[in-house]
Each structure stands twice: as C-alpha cells, then as structure tokens.
Image: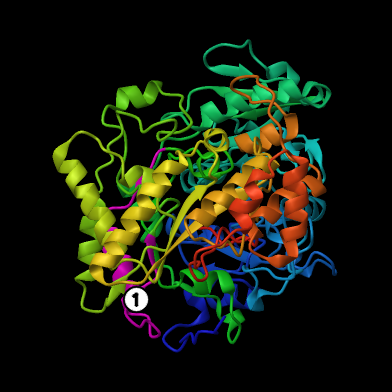
Amino acid sequence: MQKSTINYNSLCPTDWLPTSVKEMKALGWDSVDIVLFSGDAYVDHPAFGAAVIGRTLQQAGYRVAIVPQPNWQDDLRDFRKFGAPRLFFGVSPGAMDSMVNHYTANRRRRSDDAYTPGGRHGARPDYPSIVYSRILKDLFPDVPVIGGGIEFSLRRLSHYDYWEDRLRPSILADTPVDLLIYGMGERTILQLAERLSGGCRIEDIVDLPQTAMLRPLSEIPQSDENNIILSSFKDCVADKRCQARNFKFIEQESNRLEGKAVIWQVTGNKAVRVNPMLPAMTPGEIDAAFDLPYTRLPHPRYKGKTIPAYEMIRHSVNMHRGCFGGCAFCTISAHQGKFIASRSKESIMREVRQVCEMPDFKGYISDLGGPSANMYGMSGRDKDKCRRCLRPSCLHPSPCPNLNTDHGPLLDIYHAVDALPGVKKSFIGSGVRYDLSMHHTGNAEIDKRNERYNRELITDHVSGRLKVAPEHTSDAVLHLMRKPSFELFGKFNALFDKVNEKAGLRQQLIPYFISSHPGCTVEDMALLAVETKKLNFHLEQVQDFTPTPMTLATEIYYTGIHPYTGEEIFAATKTNEKLRQRMFFFWYDPEYRREITHTLHSIGRPDLISKLFGSAPPHRQNATARVSKPKPRRR
C-alpha cells in the first residue's frame, strides 16, 4: 500500500485526546476522569470506536485520555502512566475481534495487523479484553473497569470459541470488568459517566440499557415476558441443544425495535444479567456522534507511519449504522442492531466537505456506504408491526411487505455529493444488497427509482469493480445463510453487463463466495464451480467460513443443530473437509485437477468432470471472491 502524506502543520497535539502525561499537562489538566485503553492505534476519526467514545465523553465535559495499544509485556508503565482516573477505565480490544484479526480460517497466525502502524503484528495480545482488564484490576482494584467494543459485545453470553474449539462462558466470567457495554455505546457510556459522577457506586448500577454484569443467583426472577432465563452454561456444555435453544432467544432479543426482556444465564456461582438493547439512534443522535470535532487523522505519534485501516477509509463517508439483512454468518445486527440509524443529509454533506478539504484529496470519495451500502434511510412503514416483529432478517426468505425499499433518498445523497465543486466522482465501496435494489414493490414510482438506482450505481459509482455477495450457488445453502436464490444474482449479473455495454464501460462484478458454511457439502462446492464457470468467473481469492461468536452459522457449526427448527445440519468441521471444499474455487488451476477428479468420482458425480474440464470460455480477468484475510470494517 502506498503511504499517504499527512499534513500536521495546521494542528497541534492538543487537538487530539491526550495519549501521554505530557499531552495531558499541555491541556492544563493534572488528572483525568476517564482513561480508555484500545487494542488499535489511535485514529481520531468517526470510523474508529475508541475515538467516538472518547470524543462523546469529551463533548459532555469529561477529561478523557486514551492509551492505544498498551505494552502488556513490560513493567506495565502504559497502564500506570495516568494513574487512577476519577470515574473509570474503559477497555476495548479495537474495531475488530482480536482472534479474527490474528488468525486465518485455518487457525494460522497472520503476519500483519491493519490497525497497527506499519501494519505490523504483535502490538496486541490475543483476547486483549481479558488481558487489559486483568492488568488494570490488579493495579487499581478500587477503580471501575468498563468493557466495550466488538469482542465484549459478541461474547456477552456463552459462546463457541473457534480458536480454542470449545464453548466458553460469558466473557464476564473470564475478565474482572465491573460492567460490560454491548453494541454501539455512546448513549450508555454517557449515562454511566453521569451516574458515577453523581456518586453512584458501580455495583449499584444494574439497570442501564445495553449493559451486562454478574449478579448473585438470588436475583434471578421468575421467567416472564420481561425476563428470559436461558439454559445455564453448565447445561450448555453438557447438552449442545441447550446452547442452540439459547441462541434463538438471544438473537430475537437483539433484533427487537425496542428492547424488552432482561436475559439471565447462570454461570458458575453467578448469574449473567444482560439488559435490553436500546432502539436505533435517531438522526439527531447519530449526527451528534459523527459531527464531533475529530481531526480525522492518526495521532501525531504515528507521524511517518502508515496505518492500513485508516488508509482504506480516509476519503470515505459512513452514512448509517445497522443492517436488516440478517445473514447467518454476520455479526453486524448482533452489535449494531437490525434497525437502520441513518444520518441526516446535512451531516453527511458536512463530512464530505471535510474530506474535500484534506490536502491529499484528489476529488474521489472512495465510499459512500455503510454496513450494507444501500440500506440508507430504510425502515418499516408501520412501526407497530416492527415492534411486534421477531424476524432476524427483513429480506429473508423474501423482503418484508412492510419494508420501505425506496432508494430515492440514497440517490438524492449521491447527486448532492457529486454536485460539490471539489468532487469528481463518488464511489460505492461497501457491499450492495442487490436483492434489495432489485425487489419489485408493486409501487410504480418506487420501482422506477430503484431501477434508476441500479443504473446509476453501475454507470456512475463503480471504480472499475462492484462488490456483491451471492455467497453460494446452492439454494439450500443460501437458505441456511439467509441469502436470496442464486438465480437473482444471475439477473443482476445480466443487468450489470447490459448497463455496461450500453454505456461503453468495461467494469467487473466482484462476487463474494464462502466455502464450508454449515449445510454446504463437497457436492455443493462442485456445483458452485460449474455454475461460476458458466458465468466465466475464475475465483482467485476465497473465504473459508470462520465461526465467530454470536452468529446463527456458528451455533449450527458447533452444535450441529438449527436453533430455530431443531433440525440436524451437516457442517464441515475437520481441516481436510474444509480443504476439499475450498479447492473447488480453483478448479481451473492444474494443480487441483487430479484431486478434484478423484473427489468427483468418490462422491458419485463423475458427470461434472467434463463440465469443469471441457472447453472453457475466456474468463473475466481478476474476478475474485471474498478474500481470506479480513478487511477492516466500519465501526
């Protein structure tokens, strides 16, 4: 990656949150109220969680310091340098789960880290949530330690850990944090700071929304509509069906429009209490988070060094949070929620103008997106129906009739951005849900706008490549994934080619595919190879399914049971099984031909040999599936 040049001349270190005692004193402070520890480098940008939480607290009047990537292997001076804060320590592993960051799907150690200066590995431990919290409690036993971020969020209850290949209890049983904040934490952290500042004891704060904590067993109430009592961790270890049943309740409660029930799980001699999730932010609330006085730059301590994750998003703008796709392998809704929190047009335009003023900006917005690029401004028409709804996906098995899929507001944003004097072109780098943009609503005006969206997306907002995610070709596997039929991808592919031909463009459609997803067999992968060959795709980079905590696919992988139906589902869990599936992505590589031929004979499908190794049409150059190395995600 080419290193960009960052101009720090117009700024000084006090424009960032302090990372050292020297910087703290330069602000005129003798002490701080809150110290945030992060597994990432400190980038003062709304795409980085520690910066958002720090700026949110700062805006409320609190003195906040941040310690990025503290050294946990020396004399622990990074943990000691600010002393005991007045209110609490905050701990986050970073914007990405540390184990996904550190290991491949084959559990091999990665050699780089996109959230570290220079991309070097080794700047954070495995499970930094646990390591940092234990150090802080040992050093400052009387100071509250608050956990937050993706790693805490997805491990708030019993969960399967792929890297240790075992069921682990709630992370609260392994780390001495006093309180866990899950999901997007700005509103909850402010309420917590206010209560602690007002004299409340941390052990008495049990009712904050989007928090979890350990409580005495005596506090577990009777099960009712306001309290869900899960199977205990002990029972889940003994019987995988208990773990599978638990997941259904957890996912349903995570996807409510308005959180209702407290979830309880006995873990050892304590009870994990998980309070309900907050509703999605209003435009005013999410605007406030994005409009804070970020420098939008890495801290000057990294001057001369490149932080790869920052380079990827420095000229991009995130327009919303949340995702109602409900994909079985995805953690977005479990962390950000199913319901979309969209920024106002005015807030988005303010940020675009800030990007335009960056010294190295050349006129190209790299992404106007979000978790799913084209869900901006969408929600249910009848909110009463949404309040009653427990569906994990608004798109599967078919788009909800109550869902407003009008892409008009999104087109309005695109047009406004492209009309700015400093913008030559805006691209959509986030993944697009074509099952959303191609859905026919029966409303002629909306359908016409959505057709226009597809055309303009392809002609005006593709930087040579458009990313979409069919994920598989087997309808049975896609049903388990909560993804649309592969037939719909074929229709979008045809539309993409037609629009390109008419516009005289030579652009590429980049389909993402996954191997070894629960329910997927070797025969399914062989058929995937045949189908993608028909479409002239040679898949060069692929993703083998990686089980991550708190997803439907991971529960099926671990338990072998579908949590909603009780049906037993096959999953490729052995290394040789996963490699057998993966090789079909590379059917065109002579290195795999002999093994593929042998495998097709062994599964009784020799008829597919000629379909794969007969005459092949010219393939699309560089067509790729999802890369095996994780890409930094927006917060």
Residue at the image point whose x is 67% and y is 65% from the top: 589
Of 131 and 500, which appears nearest the observer?
500
Asked if 355 appears above or below 263 in the picture, the reply is: below
For the N terminus, the quadrant is: bottom right
Whether residue 133 is visible here, answered yes or no, is: no
Residue at the image point whose x is 71% and y is 66% from the top: 590
Mark 1: give few (<14), some (14-19) or many (20+) Cα within 10 Å: some
Asked if 579 appears above or below 1 in the picture, the reply is: above
Query: Horizontal and vertical percent for residue 521?
Result: 68, 39
Secondary structure state at the residue bearing disc 1: strand
Of 291 and 480, which appears nearest the observer?
480
Residue at the image point whose x is 39% and y is 65% from the top: 367
Residue closest to the far bottom: 9
Residue at the image point whose x is 41% and y is 23% from the top: 389
Query: Horizontal and vertical percent for residue 33?
Result: 58, 57
Whether residue 248 is visible here, answered yes or no, is: yes
Q: Is residue 242 left or right of residue 625?
A: right
Of 461 and 513, which appears nearest the observer?
513
Q: Is residue 238 left or right of residue 537?
A: right
Does residue 362 show up magenta in the picture? yes
Of 600 and 284, which appears nearest the observer?
600
Does residue 375 show up magenta in the picture? no
Magenta residues span: 339-368
Q: Amino acid at mark 1?
A: Tyr
Q: Is residue 230 left or right of residue 295?
A: right
Asked if 69 appears above or below 472 in the picture, the reply is: below
Give residue 484's quadrant in the image: top left
Q: Is residue 535 left or right of residue 570?
A: left
Give residue 10's quadrant in the image: bottom left
Residue that badge 1 annotates: 364
Query: Horizontal and vertical percent for residue 226?
Result: 53, 17
Query: Horizontal and vertical percent for residue 97?
Result: 66, 53
